[in-house]
């Protein structure tokens, strides 16, 4: 298993408005993460690939610290 920090564009803030948030995930690889990210609430759905700003591999320690925040 690998751990990832993902920066996503959240919607539901009015027409054309959004904000970026960090979320922490674990999975087999970055490509498999995209299918689970598509089902998350509040993510811009029309262009899901564009809603993912970055995917960065991290350590287990960083993952745990990120989940606590």
Image (cartoon, rainbow, N blue to C red):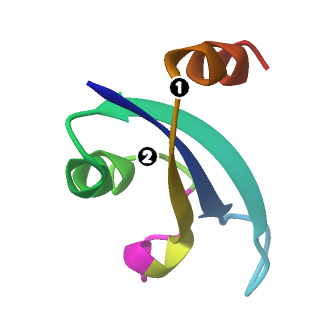
Percent across and percent down for residue 10 are: 66, 61
Camera-nearest label, 1 or 2? 1
Q: Nearer the viewer, residue 13 or 52?
A: 52
Chain-order first, disc 1 or disc 2: 2
Location of residue 27 by image quarter: top left
Circle 1 sits in a helix, a strand or a loop, which is it? loop
Tag on residue 11? none
Secondary structure mostly taken by the magenta-highlighted segment of the chain: loop
Q: Which of 56 and 11 is in front in this view?
A: 56
Left or right of residue 46: residue 32: left
Look at mark 2 in the image and give the residue it sits on: 40
Left or right of residue 42: residue 20: right
Query: Is 20 drawn above or below residue 51 in the view shown?
Result: above
Percent across and percent down for residue 69 are: 79, 20
- Tag count: 2
At a point 60% along the width and 59% down the height, the residue shown is 8
Query: Is 47 drawn above or below residue 57 in the view shown?
Result: below
Query: Is 35 drawn above or below residue 12 in the view shown?
Result: above
Circle 2 sits in a helix, a strand or a loop, which is it? loop
Percent across and percent down for residue 31 are: 23, 57
Query: Is 10 drawn above or below residue 48 in the view shown?
Result: above
Residue 22 belongs to the span the image colors magenta: no
Tell me if mark 2 has few (under 14), some (14-19) or many (20+) residues whose alpha carbon lies within 10 angstroms of its own. few
What are the residue bounds of the magenta stretch?
Answer: 43-49
Give the spatial CA distance, label 1 vs label 2: 23 Å
Look at mark 1 in the image and give the residue it sits on: 59
Left or right of residue 40: residue 23: right
At a point 69% along the width and 64% down the height, the residue shown is 12
């Amino acid at each position: 298993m690998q751990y990832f920090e993902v920066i996503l564009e959240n919607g539901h803030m009015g027409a054309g408005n959004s904000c970026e948030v960090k979320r922490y995930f674990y999975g087999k690889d970055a490509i498999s993460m995209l299918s689970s990210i598509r089902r998350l609430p509040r993510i811009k759905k029309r262009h899901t690939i564009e809603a993912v700003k970055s995917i960065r591999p991290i350590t287990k320690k960083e993952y745990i610290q990120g989940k606590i925040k």
